[in-house]
Amino acid sequence: LAKTTQPISMDSYEGQEVNITCSHNNIATNDYITWYQQFPSQGPRFIIQGYKTKVTNEVASLFIPADRKSSTLSLPRVSLSDTAVYYCLVGDKRQAGTALIFGKGTTLSVSS
Amino acid sequence: NAGVTQTPKFRVLKTGQSMTLLCAQDMNHEYMYWYRQDPGMGLRLIHYSVGEGTTAKGEVPDGYNVSRLKKQNFLLGLESAAPSQTSVYFCASTLTLRYEQYFGPGTRLTVT
């Protein structure tokens, strides 16, 4: 199973762009990279998913270099409501038991 | 459309007691999952199901049993609760492995 490494915590201010990098050195050919967000006392919420290059949606962008050994979640112009834990997951979408392996995540704190 | 619901929201058990946690989804999803989350930790997969009548072990299955008799319901059972099972339990579901997972609000279980 591809394991992921993320920073334990990050701090930012409102209006700044935040980039959270995830390392996954042993990612396999069929693995996808998925990011989830979790607020206190709530279940995780899907943010974005990608395989290679760049993916963008209305919430975030995901940058994946050619070697796929890392990925970066980019949150544009964060607000206080973006304070949450962010999880990077790497797994084979064909394998139900491995597609959702969560690590400890990155706690993002946004201040005014 | 209620999404993923979990019953109960809170529960306190004494060591050795049994209980069943219910997860229900109204999105006609094939895949369902049970996770536990301990303080400062990410989510760990307990058991999962790839369809009605099927179940499989995840990362931390010991002490738990599951059943998926109906497509919309996924039950998690604790036959003899132990203090180590004090945790927040999350259920999730997804239509297929290609799509995002939807999480329930969680069940906070305390075993004394």
Image (cartoon, coloured by chain):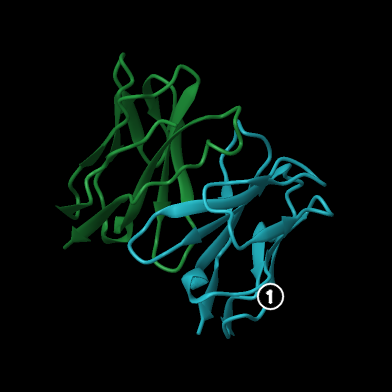
**A79 left or right of B36?**
left
The image quadrant of residue B62 is: bottom right
Tell me what residue is drawn at x 33 percent, y 49 percent.
Answer: A105
Relative vertical location of residue B74 with respect to residue B7 in this rendering, above or below: above
**Total numbered labels placed on residues in the image:** 1
Residue B19 appears in the rendering: yes
Between B57 and B42, the one nearer to me in the picture: B57
Between A64 and B85, the one nearer to me in the picture: B85
Q: Where residue A53 appears, x then y in whole percent?
A: 35, 18
Tell me what residue is drawn at x 46 percent, y 16 percent.
Answer: A29
- Amino acid on which disc 1 is placed: Met
Residue lying farthest top? A66
Between A98 and B102, the one nearer to me in the picture: A98
The image quadrant of residue A67 is: top left
Tell me what residue is drawn at x 69 percent, y 59 percent.
Answer: B65
Residue B25 appears in the rendering: no
Q: Where residue A37 appears, x then y in whole percent?
A: 40, 51
* Colour green, chain: A
Relative vertical location of residue A69 with respect to residue B33 in this rendering, above or below: above
The image quadrant of residue B75 is: bottom right
**B20 left or right of A88?**
right
- Secondary structure under tag 1 reads strand
Tell me what residue is drawn at x 68 percent, y 75 percent.
Answer: B19
Relative vertical location of residue B29 with respect to residue B39 in this rendering, above or below: above
Q: Which chain is indicated by disc 1?
A: B
Between A18 and B85, the one nearer to me in the picture: B85
* Colour cyan, chain: B
Q: The N terminus of chain B appears in which quarter of the rendering?
A: bottom right
| Circle 1 residue | B19
